[in-house]
Image (cartoon, rainbow, N blue to C red):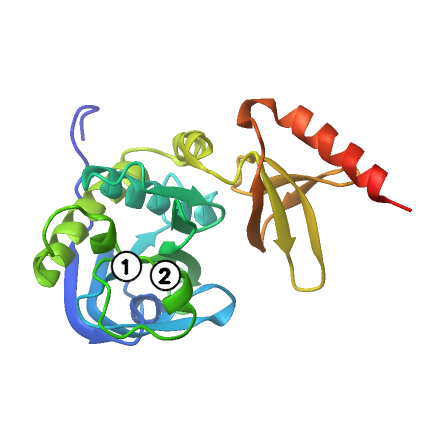
Amino acid sequence: MTASAKPEPFPIEFVDECDSTNRVLIDRVRSGGVSPVLLVARRQTAGKGRLGRTWDAPAGSAFTGSWLVPMRENGWVEHPWLLSIGVALAVGDVLVELGLEHCFHLKWPNDIMTTSNTKLCGILAEFVSAPTSGATAVVVGAGLNLIRPQHVDGVLAERGAWVNELLSDDQPDDRLLLESVAIRLNDHVRFWLIGNGPEQAISEYRKRCSTIGQHVRVEQIEVTWDGIATDVSSDGSLMVTDSTGLARKVTAADVVHVRPAPNRNDIKNDIKNDLTNDMKEQP
């Protein structure tokens, strides 16, 4: 392939219904199938999220799809967990194409949120290997809410958002919107996961990540603590300076935006002010 040649996109497979596109592709890899593909379900009954969470996406309400990315001879092989960042960038690109550039932000580690902090999209990457061949792959799933269903229950009713609620045009046809988003999204994933490498993705993600500069609450399994998010490291971890001034690396956690820092370009002053206020409040 010449330097100017455009890499081929992932082949797309559509299915009417499945429990989880991630689960289907993980089983495929374990059975020896490691060819790259995008699997899209028109309805997903048990989508996989962080910390074992699941959700039901009624037919036509969401893009629910997963990419099978073989790791052999792949530029991302040393950084497989960064693939979710590449997919997040691709989702952002599609939302910009839909005219929603001022309606969303990328929240570390794997969410796309509206400006009112309701959730448009979640992303989950899972590493998997084939027991017989030893081949390895990463399955990256994304659930992007497209058209709000008539009935929404639970947390999704309070915290969910849908693309059609943000569009100024008439109500789109659900099937056409799903297929259009799948094709557009697949094209942008090709750009980030095939046309570029992890270094380029991290560099761009730093520019777009709204968590950098935020006062955040880090919720881990055994402890919860506050700090100022200062950067995303080269391996995709979130760098947070806690109330003692210690810079800490967060690789896995739920991160809540407590409030924005007044000036993203002056993070050091934000940390200093927060530490001073914390000391004043101590007895």
**Residue sitting farthest toward the right:** 283
Residue 54 left/right relative to 14: right
Circle 2 crowding by C-alpha within 10 Å: few under 14, some 14–19, many from 20:
some
Count of all numbered marks drawn on residues in the image: 2
- Residue type (three-letter) at the residue carrying disc 2: Gly
Q: Is the residue 269 above or below the residue 275 in the image? A: above
- The image quadrant that residue 189 belongs to is top left
- Mark nearer the viewer, 1 or 2: 2
Q: Residue at x 24, y 62 (%)?
A: 62
Give the number of the disc on residue 160. Answer: 2
Q: Position of residue 232 (x, y in %)?
A: 54, 36
- For the N terminus, give its image quadrant: top left
Q: Position of residue 254 (x, y in %)?
A: 56, 56
Do labels 1 and 2 touch, CB within 8 Å?
yes
Q: Position of residue 92 (x, y in %)?
A: 31, 41
Q: Is the residue 283 above or below the residue 262 in the image? A: below
* In-front residue for pair 150/247: 150
Q: Residue at x 72, y 35 (%)?
A: 274
Residue 109 left/right relative to 122: right
Q: Position of residue 98 (x, y in %)?
A: 19, 42
Q: Is residue 180 visible?
A: yes
Secondary structure type for disc 2: loop
Q: Is residue 36 visible?
A: no
- Residue type (three-letter) at the residue carrying disc 1: Asn
Give the number of the disc on residue 41. Answer: none
Circle 1 crowding by C-alpha within 10 Å: few under 14, some 14–19, many from 20:
many
Secondary structure type for disc 1: strand
Residue 232 left/right relative to 105: right
Give the number of the disc on residue 145. Answer: 1
Q: Residue at x 77, y 36 (%)?
A: 277
